[in-house]
Amino acid sequence: MTAAVRTLEFADGREAADLGAFLARLIHYDRAAAVRLQAGGGALAVFGRPPSFEVLAIRTARLAAAPEFDVTVSAGELLEALDESAGSVVVPAAVTGPPWAGVLPPRGGWRQVAGLPDEEAIRGALTAAVAEFRARDERLAPNERTRAERDRIGREIWSRTLGDTRLPLRAVHAAQSLGFLRPVRAMVPAGAGREERPTLLESGAWLRLRTPYGSIAVRSAGLGGLTVTPA
């Protein structure tokens, strides 16, 4: 029996454009990327995992209607099916999801935690980490400049925590790379329906860096060994 075609209408054309940009960035890191879609309450949540960062990336979009479904699809097929001019998307056929797709952060129980630096300090920490990685890479002898050694340096740097929080720097790096951190002048004006500044939330072992453009979630002990939940 042929599955019914599901078309989603976005509440605003900009939602479609922002989702397209997010999907394109995910595919940049993994051409075979899959995303898990959860629709409910008039919103669509899109979950992805860029392999370079070992975090979960979450992008939400407001919908014109209020369908409810939960499916994992190809990120590339979803991007191809996105019609930014019409503000709609035809949801592709489901695919067998990777292991992480069954392991999502909880929907509720989030509370804001203190210690997150201001935006200037966040960007400063990220800039310093990138500069350190480049400097240490340049100091490597030719016979030491291997993928394994570069990965070791990267793990050391990006596993450090941000400010007085337990948030690893790799979460900030992922947020920057996926377009979730933008210059202050580009932030959404007050009253525009989205939070103005990044916030750090906690629920159980999970930490979530939330910005007006998306969220990065990471479990304190890493993403391995998690229990499977339909979250």
Image (cartoon, helix red, strand yellow):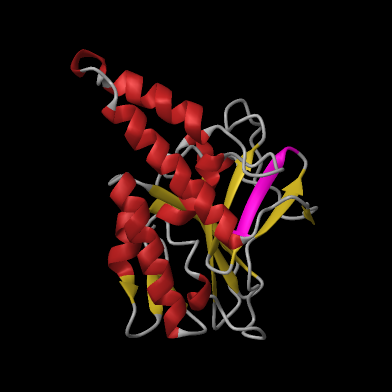
Q: Secondary structure of the magenta portion, mostly? A: strand
For residue 215, say whether it is visible.
Answer: no
Against 49, is 40 above or below? below
Against 25, is 88 above or below? below
For residue 85, say whether it is visible.
Answer: yes
Q: Which residue is at 55% across, 32% downward? A: 159
Q: Which residue is at 72% across, 53% downward? A: 201
Residue 23 on image: x %, y %: 37, 59
Residue 39 on image: x %, y %: 58, 65
Residue closest to the far top = 143
Could you tell me how many numbered marks the image carries?
Answer: 0
Query: Which of the pair 230/141 is nearer the observer?
Result: 141
Q: Which residue is at 30% across, 56% downward? A: 76
Residue 211 on image: x %, y %: 59, 63
| Span colored in magenta | 205-210
Quarter of the N terminus within the rendering: bottom left
Q: Which residue is at 45% across, 55% downward? A: 176
Query: Which of the pair 13/195 is nearer the observer?
Result: 195
* Residue 23 lies within the magenta run: no
203 to the left or right of 129:
right
224 to the left or right of 90:
right
48 to the left or right of 218:
left
Q: Quadrant of residue 3?
A: bottom left
Residue closest to the far left = 142
Residue 29 on image: x %, y %: 32, 46
